[in-house]
């Protein structure tokens, strides 16, 4: 949202731009009220009641594109930035209107330094999220080509790294990521992570291999993602672990994670092992997600922690099921819902599914619209697990059909773990307790005895020392 304008500023703005604005668009102070009323009636302006008026978010960037073509952008930008400012403290403490305005101006001025200075207070996304600045929306290749290479890379990384998480974005950007000829340097690590995630989400194994070749094999996760798409999970895990060792060597840190979508997949591949070492690795990844990654990953990191507590026997199946439902009952991301379904189907499939059918249908539809065909295929298979079908099955394009045939062959991640019978869980929990409490020395003076107490429907194990 822009910082709101007052009614008196509209004619002042037009008066200052009289050399650029056609006469039929000029307006006097007397006529401004009727003009504003008409704009509000048509949904182009919104009266916030307490903070002035704002332009419809879908129009903000469209208007800027026109001003760039008409060469009036600098005049508009100068007037807006020179306008009387509201309390400067609001800028530092999260008032997003003026910050969004300044980001938009800096972006179209090709000023990457100003963008980085503007987001110093808090993370603000350029595009790809419901609450982003929404720059370059609608996407326009002509405007994009005017940006410097570093800003093009920054924009693509920022916008695309959110789109597969939230479902917001533009398919043209996804297609551009596959077709664009990137001149990558050592400083383009964030863009390489984003491209890896996009190519995995789209199921583009060829693009993953080309990027691996272009980066001279420095990113083993690119090979891991190819194995993941092929359903070769063991090989994918080997390559992911090689990537982790490489990141540790570069950063000098012990607790590290692979960025973005490959890091999420790496965490999920640890679940079949269900060993103390694998559970610790998942907890490390979840902690990094919550602490260092964007806020959109908070619920997902929490899901992974809850699942590990369940695997360790620290949560009952009922408690874990309730936590799954709580995590996805609030307004959460598509990726969180996708992972929640995996965890439910692997660990507690006898309970009620925490993700609603209509939410999975929406997920499938949004991934289809963005061209994230592998994620779309996973959502489709989740629907089939619930004996449901995609909501927009009749609108498939030939491209959709081709990708569905392609991804009908490799097994879905739903098959990564076969859910264990309910009666076996207490015994496995006992085994895990023994694994995690191995004595350091033999103490023959004490013995742990378990009393077996059967009942009609279940049994209890009571320890005695």
Image (cartoon, rainbow, N blue to C red):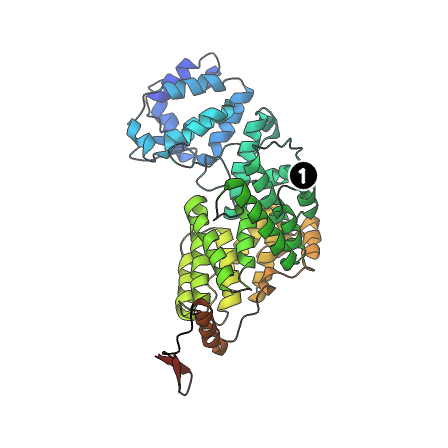
Q: Residue at x 63, y 41 (%)?
A: 218
Q: Which of 186 and 116 is in front in this view?
A: 186
Q: In this view, does 108 lie above or below 200?
A: above
Q: Residue 193: percent from the left, percent from the top?
A: 57, 41
Res 313 quadrant in image: bottom left
Res 305 quadrant in image: bottom left
Q: Nearer the viewer, residue 163 or 302?
A: 302
Quadrant for the N terminus in the image: top left
174 with respect to 441 (left or right): right
Number of residues whose C-alpha sits closer than 10 Å to that of mark 1, classed few (under 14), some (14–19) or many (20 or more): few
Q: Is residue 233 above or below residue 96?
A: below
Q: Is residue 312 visible?
A: yes
Figure disc tally: 1
Q: In this view, does 244 lie above or below 90?
A: below
Q: Residue 137: percent from the left, percent from the top?
A: 53, 34
Q: Which residue is drawn at 70% across and 55% down?
A: 406
Q: Name the residue under label 1.
A: 216
Q: Residue 362: percent from the left, percent from the top?
A: 53, 54
Residue at disc 1, secondary structure: loop
Q: Which residue is drawn at 30% across and 26% down?
A: 86
Q: Residue 235: percent from the left, percent from the top?
A: 65, 56
Q: Is residue 389 visible?
A: no
Q: In this view, does 244 lie above or below 134?
A: below
Quadrant for the C terminus in the image: bottom left
Extreme residue in the top direction: 19
Q: Which residue is drawn at 41% across and 83% down?
A: 459
270 with respect to 84 (left or right): right
């Amino acid at each position: 949202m822009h910082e709101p304008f007052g009614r008196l500023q509209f004619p002042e703005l037009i008066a200052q731009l009289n050399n650029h604005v056609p006469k039929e668009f000029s307006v006097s102070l007397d006529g401004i009220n009727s003009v504003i009323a008409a704009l509000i009636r048509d949904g182009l302006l919104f009266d916030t009641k307490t903070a002035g008026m704002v332009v419809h978010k879908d129009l903000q960037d469209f208007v800027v594109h026109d001003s760039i073509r008409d060469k009036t952008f600098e005049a508009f930008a100068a007037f807006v930035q020179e306008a009387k400012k509201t309390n400067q403290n609001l800028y530092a403490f999260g008032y997003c209107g003026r910050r969004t305005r300044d980001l938009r101006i800096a972006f179209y001025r090709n000023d990457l330094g100003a963008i980085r200075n503007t987001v110093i207070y808090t993370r603000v996304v350029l595009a790809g999220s419901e609450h982003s600045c929404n720059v370059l929306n609608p996407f326009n290749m002509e405007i994009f080509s005017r940006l410097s290479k570093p800003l093009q890379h920054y924009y693509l990384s920022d916008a695309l790294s959110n789109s597969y998480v939230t479902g917001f974005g533009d398919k043209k950007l996804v297609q551009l990521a596959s077709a664009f000829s990137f001149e990558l340097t050592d400083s383009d690590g964030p863009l390489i992570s984003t491209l890896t995630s996009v190519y995995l989400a789209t199921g583009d194994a060829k693009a993953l291999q080309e990027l691996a070749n272009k980066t001279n094999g420095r990113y083993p996760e690119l090979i891991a993602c190819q194995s993941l798409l092929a359903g070769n999970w063991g090989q994918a895990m080997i390559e992911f672990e090689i990537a982790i060792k490489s990141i540790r060597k570069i950063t000098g840190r012990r607790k590290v994670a692979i960025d973005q979508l490959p890091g999420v997949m790496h965490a999920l591949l640890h679940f079949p092992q269900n060993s103390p070492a694998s559970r610790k690795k998942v907890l490390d990844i979840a902690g990094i997600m919550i602490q260092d990654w964007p806020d959109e990953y908070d619920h997902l990191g929490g899901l992974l922690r809850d699942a590990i507590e369940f695997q360790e026997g620290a949560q009952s199946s009922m408690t874990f099921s309730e936590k799954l439902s709580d995590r996805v009952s609030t307004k959460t991301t598509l990726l969180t819902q996708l992972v929640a379904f995996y965890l439910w189907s692997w660990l507690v499939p006898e309970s009620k599914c925490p993700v609603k059918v209509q939410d999975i249908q929406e997920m499938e539809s949004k991934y289809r619209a963005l061209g994230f065909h592998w994620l779309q295929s996973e959502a489709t298979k989740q629907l089939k697990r619930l004996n449901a079908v995609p909501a927009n099955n009749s609108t498939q394009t030939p491209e959709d059909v081709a990708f569905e045939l392609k991804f009908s062959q490799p097994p879905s991640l739903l098959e990564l773990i076969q859910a264990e019978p309910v009666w076996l869980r207490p015994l496995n929990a006992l085994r895990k307790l023994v694994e995690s409490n191995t004595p350091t020395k033999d103490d023959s003076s004490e013995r742990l005895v378990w009393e077996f107490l059967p009942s009609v429907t279940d049994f209890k194990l009571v320890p005695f020392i």
